[in-house]
Image: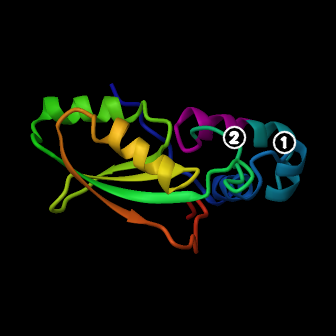
Amino acid sequence: MEEKNSEIDRIDNRIIDALVENGRISITELSEKVGLSKTPCQLRLKRLMNEGYITGFRAVLNPAKMGLEHIAFAEVKLSDTREEALRAFNAAVKKIREVEECHMIASSFDYLLKVRTSDIKRYRIVLGEKISALPYVESTSTFVVMQNVVDSGFRR
């Protein structure tokens, strides 16, 4: 049975906005920023997490410092799009570390993958040895990013 989420109000939205801006903000700072005392702020934060509005916190890495500046998008066309094939592809693609995003697309191809590697040479290896070897992959097409203009993650 699916859990019913409560409605979020303007204070919940302020909490979310503050956390999007700074996920490491202390509960004291957060409560001051949204105009609540600590306990009600903590309760609201816990509810937002329990109800799935906030699904987690993570470090945002600097790709240049990590040696991962190369981004390519790969279109993937499957040979079979029945549910069993989609499940097999979905499960397998999640295991490829270099795949940063994977989206099922309503188009002439089936999936769009965002792949981050150190350089084009490494991308070619990932494409040839990992992506092309995924279940039911019929063909791929690659678009290489020349400049990353906007990459800010999810924003409201």
Which region of the structure is painted magenta?
A: 43-54
Please tell me in which quadrant of the rendered image residue 3 appears.
top left
Which percent across, then down, holds residue 42?
A: 76, 37
The crowd level at tag 2 (other Cα within 10 Å; few <14, some 14-19, many 20+) is: many
Can you identify the residue that label 1 sits on?
Answer: 27
Which percent across, then down, holds residue 80?
A: 9, 40
Residue drawn at x 14%, y 34% as measured from the top left: 83
Q: In the picture shown, does residue 110 fall above or below 40?
A: below
In this rendering, would 60 be left or right of 146? right
Can you identify the residue that label 2 sits on?
Answer: 45
Nearest the eye: 43 or 17:
17
Which percent across, then down, holds residue 16?
A: 66, 53
Residue drawn at x 65%, y 52% as measured from the top left: 12
Residue drawn at x 55%, y 54% as measured from the top left: 119
Marks 2 & 1, CB-CB < 8 Å contact: yes
* Amino acid type, callout 2: Leu
Q: Is residue 147 magenta?
A: no
